[in-house]
Image: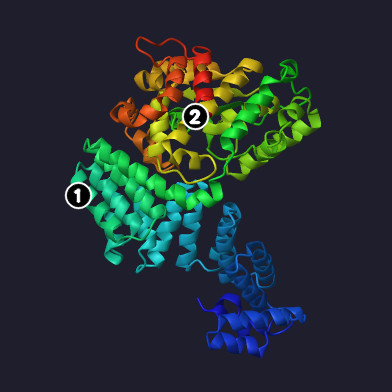
């Protein structure tokens, strides 16, 4: 789009209190955007008001990295020209950059209400919906984009990825081939086609596609990491485990270097240690105080489902979500205000112990507002908040939601850490630690030690279950969990892949459940035992603690071998 179309041309200017200066229009007409922006700033400073001027200044601020200043100017421009769809689009794109996805989607929808023919806006809306976890909505939006942009490969490439995410390999292949016909180097379509080849039993073809792309693709970045990881999956399927591990490690190392300036000095493990120290100094009595006078919670049953990343929480979530009376929140942070108030400061847990009813009520209300902000209505339902790292927040959950049910998933520690290392997570302060096997094991150990300390010191009811037990006997394990939650076991819960097949699940890993319970991920670590030797001192004690030993079994517990686990952590300086 041209600058004049974006900010309003001369025809629109006639309806405004003041027209843009002729010098600004002249600079735009000769293609000198920088001069136009400088002149626009001068005009605004002189008191001239026009959406074009605000838009030009916003573009300049955005280019200089002053994103909040740019947002202020775009907002001013939109207020002056609310019927300008391109301005709404520009504002939405900036909100995406600021990480404000839901506001961005609202801006894109306003633009489309004005101009439903704008294929680029449909594409941007679809990408924002993917980031928000709305894969069904994203599929609809990207389909609209593909219809309106027949010569553009990007919507087709993203649609091919969404098709493979729900396990529709033939549709993924068709869309990927269509995208690659327009752009043979498209990364997303290449991966989708390789995924389809792999699932069709053609790993050699998948490997060749990925190797060709990697040889000619761009430098280190997210697309390269995804391709390296997928090639690792192919080599694993071929039984070439040493090569697979090397590919996972290469992609992780490149990604770690890229993100080191931002996350390289993370104090995450130290933060978990600090929470453990605070907990050890706590007295149990204040935690037992009920929230007297609190209104009943919105859901019929409130469930927090947690564990560690890749511990198998998705399987249980999908089994529960198969019921019509269950709604889930999938790995979204709704406890923001409580975490900031009580878990980010050295004396935070002490303040949480003594927080008054009005303070606690305020944080509860903020939680429910955020849940609804994510598009989930819990009223009258069984509401499952699934977030693996909510174990860090157990004291906050017990204090704010004493009526909630807490369910904690365990899985073979070696499988968990290896799976985290292999998985291609979006990088944040938590997942950055998973890019290195040693730091992943340290994080796992520190997390489990913290949860163990919480359970030792603070009275609280937590149901522990082993993922492997759920895989081995889905009806029996579900019956025990449903009994804890006060639910009746129902037949639809056994079809754990239905929502995946319907394209309603945002987690890419859920495709493994498409055809039912999948046993392929169990004991994978044994194929990589040599590579895991260096982290076994951290992980083996937890294997004993959770009953993953020869002849083990029985109810899982944090109590067994607790001292051994602690000693391993201390010895390795976690």
Q: Is residue 392 left or right of residue 258?
A: right
Q: Residue 277: in sight, yes or no?
A: yes
Front position among marks 2 and 1: 2
Marks 2,1: beta carbons within 8 A: no
Q: Which mark is residue 205?
A: 1
Asked which quadrant contains residue 56, the reply is bottom right
**For the residues marked 2 and 1, what is the alpha-carbon distance in whole angstroms?**
36 Å
Asked which quadrant contains residue 507, the reply is top left
Asked if residue 55 is positioned above or below residue 247 in the image, the reply reads below
Sequence-earlier tag: 2 or 1: 1
Q: How many marks?
A: 2
Mark 2 element type: helix
Residue 503, horizontal then vertical, whole percent: 40, 43
Residue 561, horizontal then vertical, whole percent: 49, 13
Mark 1 element type: helix
Q: Provide the residue designation for mark 2.
A: 444
Q: Which mark is residue 135?
A: none
Question: Which residue shows up at 33% across the image and 25% down it?
Answer: 523
Comparing 182 with 8, the one in front is: 182
Asked if residue 36 is positioned above or below residue 407 in the image, the reply reads below
Asked which quadrant contains residue 201, the reply is top left
Question: Which residue shows up at 55% across the image and 87% down it?
Answer: 29
Decide: few, some or many residues near mark 2? Use Cα within 10 Å; few <14, some 14-19, many ≥20: many
Comparing 548 with 92, the one in front is: 548
Decide: few, some or many residues near mark 1? Use Cα within 10 Å; few <14, some 14-19, many ≥20: some
Question: Which residue shows up at 49% across the image and 60% down it?
Answer: 124
Q: What kind of colouring is applied to the model shown?
A: rainbow
Question: Which residue shows up at 63% across the image and 79% down it?
Answer: 37
Q: Residue 398: in sight, yes or no?
A: no
Asked if residue 384 is positioned above or below residue 176 in the image, the reply reads above
Residue 484, horizontal then vertical, whole percent: 54, 16
Comparing 244 with 123, the one in front is: 244
């Amino acid at each position: 789009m041209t600058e004049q179309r974006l900010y309003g041309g001369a025809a629109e200017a006639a309806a405004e209190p003041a027209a843009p200066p002729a010098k600004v229009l002249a600079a735009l007409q000769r293609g000198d955007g920088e001069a136009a922006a400088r002149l626009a700033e001068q005009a605004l400073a002189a008191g001239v008001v026009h959406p074009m001027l605000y838009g030009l200044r916003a573009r300049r601020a955005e280019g200089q990295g002053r994103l909040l200043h740019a947002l202020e100017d775009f907002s001013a421009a939109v207020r002056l020209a609310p019927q300008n769809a391109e301005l709404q689009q520009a504002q939405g794109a900036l909100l995406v950059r600021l990480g404000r996805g839901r506001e961005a989607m609202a801006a894109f929808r306003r633009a489309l209400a004005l101009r439903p023919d704008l294929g680029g806006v449909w594409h941007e809306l679809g990408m924002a919906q993917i980031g928000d976890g709305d894969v069904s909505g994203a599929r609809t939006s990207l389909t609209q984009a593909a219809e309106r942009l027949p010569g553009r490969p990007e919507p087709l490439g993203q649609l091919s990825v969404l098709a493979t995410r729900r396990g529709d390999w033939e549709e993924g292949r068709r869309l990927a081939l269509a995208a690659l016909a327009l752009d043979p180097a498209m990364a997303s379509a290449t991966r989708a086609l390789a995924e389809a080849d792999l699932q069709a039993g053609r790993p050699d073809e998948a490997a060749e596609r990925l190797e060709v792309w990697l040889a000619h693709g761009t430098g280190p970045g997210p697309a390269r990491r995804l391709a390296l990881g997928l090639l690792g999956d192919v080599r694993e399927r071929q039984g070439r485990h040493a090569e697979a591990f090397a590919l996972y490690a290469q992609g992780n190392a490149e990604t770690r270097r890229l993100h080191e300036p931002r996350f390289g000095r993370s104090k995450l493990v130290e933060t978990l240690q600090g929470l453990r120290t605070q907990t050890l100094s706590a007295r149990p009595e204040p935690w037992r105080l009920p929230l007297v006078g609190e209104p009943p919670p919105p859901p019929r049953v409130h469930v927090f489902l947690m564990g560690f990343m890749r511990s198998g929480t998705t399987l249980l979530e999908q089994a529960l979500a198969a019921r019509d009376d269950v709604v889930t929140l999938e790995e979204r942070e709704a406890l923001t205000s409580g975490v900031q108030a009580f878990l980010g400061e050295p004396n935070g847990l002490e303040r949480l112990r003594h927080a008054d009813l009005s303070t606690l009520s305020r944080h509860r209300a903020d939680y429910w507002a955020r849940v609804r902000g994510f598009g989930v209505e819990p009223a009258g339902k069984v509401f499952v908040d699934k977030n693996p790292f909510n174990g860090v927040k157990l004291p906050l959950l017990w204090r704010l939601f004493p009526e909630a049910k807490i369910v904690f998933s365990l899985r073979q520690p070696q499988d968990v850490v290896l799976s985290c290392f292999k998985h291609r997570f979006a990088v944040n302060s938590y997942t950055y630690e998973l890019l290195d096997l040693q730091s992943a094991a340290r994080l796992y150990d520190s997390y489990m030690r913290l949860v163990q300390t919480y359970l030792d010191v603070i009275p609280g009811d937590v149901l522990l279950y082993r993922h492997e037990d759920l895989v081995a006997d889905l009806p029996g394990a579900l019956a025990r969990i449903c009994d804890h939650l006060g639910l009746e076991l129902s037949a639809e819960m056994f079809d754990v892949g239905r929502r995946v097949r319907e394209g309603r699940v945002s987690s890419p890993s859920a495709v493994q459940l498409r055809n039912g319970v999948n046993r392929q991920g169990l004991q994978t670590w044994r194929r990589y035992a040599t590579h895991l030797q260096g982290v076994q001192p951290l992980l083996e004690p937890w294997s004993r603690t959770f009953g993953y030993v020869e002849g083990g079994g029985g109810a899982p517990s944090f109590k067994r071998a607790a001292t051994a686990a602690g000693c391993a952590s201390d010895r390795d300086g976690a």
